[in-house]
Image: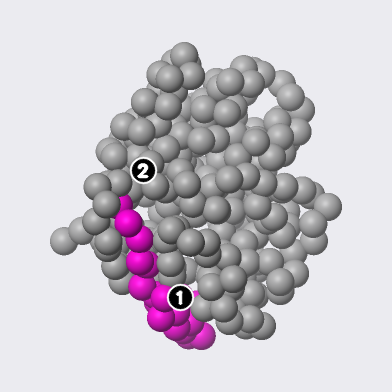
Amino acid sequence: MKQWYESLFENYARNYDKECFVQGTAGECDFIEAEVGRDKSPKILDIGCGTGRHAIELTKRGYNVTGVDLSESQLARAREKAQEAGLTIVFQTQDARNLTFDGEFDLAIMLCEGGFSLMETDEMNFAILKSAARALNAQGKLIFTTLNGLFPLFHSVSEFYKSAQKEGQSQCKDCSFDLMTFRDHNTAVFEDDFGNKRALQCNERYYVPSEITWLLKTLGFKKINIFGAKLGAYSRNDKLTTDDFEMLVIAEK
């Protein structure tokens, strides 16, 4: 049986690119460039690359990026967009829980919930971090965003989604946050690329900073910094607060 995140991305690539939460690509790539000191030599792995927005933008800027995703549909769109831009980028169908790489990359990015936090068990989410750590070399760096578990303790997730959604875009309904598991169960309502209206039962894991720090330390990361993640404007100057829906994690070996 397919999981909700597999069903969601079956035929949802063009419409996905119109969503409000994927419009910050250029600013997010500015931050990644700053993190590598604008050095073009690092090999970058984009985990859960989706339709390739970060991989394509970084390649345009002269970086060497490999993109992986579970969804054939998303990758087909990524390849199409890369071709339209006249770029050659390796996009591979891979499961983030079991990547085939071993010490090959200098930097791994996993942005906008690129796999991590969407899995149905904590063990599967941890497998993604473990897999990302294994793909990195001994001096590797991992940059990812994930849902901030401090947010739902102080705010309504349902109200947040309502305030963020725009006409014609996907909607998140019937949110119920479980304090014991830190999972939000909700219904995602969206229109796929064929014009079909669909509704999927989803559940996403929110993490608190101390959990993320502990998980990454067990994987051998020595330096872990966590900040608030502002769409299209990541910055080390943004201290994580209870008002941040997402957190930005930077882990170095």
Q: Is residue 239 above or below residue 128?
A: below
Q: Quadrant of the C terminus?
A: top right
Q: CA distance from mark 2 to mark 1?
A: 26 Å
Q: Position of residue 135 (x, y in %)?
A: 48, 36
Front-lying residue, 220 or 21 = 21
Residue corresponding to mark 1? 183
Q: Residue at x 67, y 46 (%)?
A: 232
Q: Position of residue 203 (x, y in %)?
A: 39, 70
Magenta stretch containing residue 141, yes or no?
Answer: no
Numbered disc total: 2
**Of helix, strand and loop, which one carries label 2?**
loop
Q: Quadrant of the N terminus?
A: bottom left
Front-lying residue, 13 or 117 = 13
Q: Which residues are magenta?
A: 173-192
- The amino acid at mark 1 is Arg
Residue 190 visible to the viewer: yes
Residue 101 visible to the viewer: no
Q: Which mark is residue 13?
A: 2
Left or right relative to 28: residue 124:
left
Residues under numbered marks 2 and 1 in contact, where contact means CB atoms less than 8 Å apart: no
Q: Residue at x 42, y 76 (%)?
A: 173
Q: Position of residue 228 (x, y in %)?
A: 72, 59
